[in-house]
């Protein structure tokens, strides 16, 4: 079951943390999150899953930044979120998607217990100017049924910025 906006508001500050929280961003069954003022792009065209890939940070200026097609941009939310007893999920806003911008290419699923900023995998189909602070995606919450373990020590837990892929750690740990 997905929580309604009223249920999200009822659990804010307890099982659901969104900082900062603005009541006007609450939707009937989700909450809008905004884009931070930095993006990250990988330095090399060819990436390697088994190794760390270097990346550069781009600051989004006040006049916006034009995204290029066929380039993966990593961004992050301005909002820090933490969730206990609910599964957080992330989706792009339909208004953003209708401009040909994909906000999370494959990773919109969160784990119970995740705490941090959401890294966004941004991709566009044609050039588009984006702006820091735009409400770019929405978070919503599912109930979880049965016993569960919380996400506590994963690769991306308690992050403080944009997180490039750490899949290479899976190769090292084997």
Image: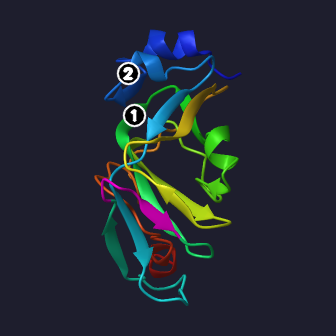
Q: CA distance from mark 2 to mark 1?
A: 16 Å
Neighbor class of circle 2 (other Cα within 10 Å; few <14, some 14-19, many 20+) is few
Q: Position of residue 62 (x, y in %)?
A: 30, 53
Residue at image point 61% right, 72% down: 69
Kindly indicate the quadrant of the structure image that contains residue 126. Answer: bottom right
Q: Residue 70, which numbered label? A: none
Is residue 37 rendered to the left or right of residue 148? left
Q: Which residue is mark 1?
A: 82
Can you tell which of label 2 and label 1 is closer to the viewer? 2
Q: Relative to residue 162, is residue 97 depicted above or below?
A: above
Up-down: is 148 above or below 38?
Answer: above
Badge 2 or badge 1: first in the primary sequence? 2
**Picture residue at 35% right of the left edge, 55% below the top:** 63
Residue 156 location, x and y as percent? 40, 56
Is residue 113 visible in the rendered image? The answer is: no
Q: Secondary structure at mark 1?
A: strand
């Amino acid at each position: 079951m997905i929580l309604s906006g009223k249920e999200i508001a009822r659990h804010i500050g307890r099982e659901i943390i969104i900082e900062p929280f603005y009541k006007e961003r609450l939707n009937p069954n989700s909450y809008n999150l905004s884009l931070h003022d930095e993006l990250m792009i990988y330095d090399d065209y060819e990436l390697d899953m088994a190794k760390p890939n270097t990346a550069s940070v781009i600051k989004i200026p006040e006049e916006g930044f034009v995204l290029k097609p066929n380039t993966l941009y990593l961004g992050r939310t301005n909002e820090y979120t933490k969730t206990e007893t609910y599964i957080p999920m992330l989706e792009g806003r339909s208004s953003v998607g209708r401009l040909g911008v994909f906000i999370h290419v494959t990773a919109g699923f969160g784990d119970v217990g995740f705490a941090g900023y959401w890294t966004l995998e941004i991709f566009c189909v044609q050039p588009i100017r984006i702006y820091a602070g735009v409400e770019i995606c929405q978070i919503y919450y599912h109930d979880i049924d049965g016993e569960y373990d919380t996400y506590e020590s994963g690769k991306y837990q308690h992050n403080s910025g944009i997180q490039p892929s750490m899949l290479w750690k899976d190769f090292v740990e084997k």
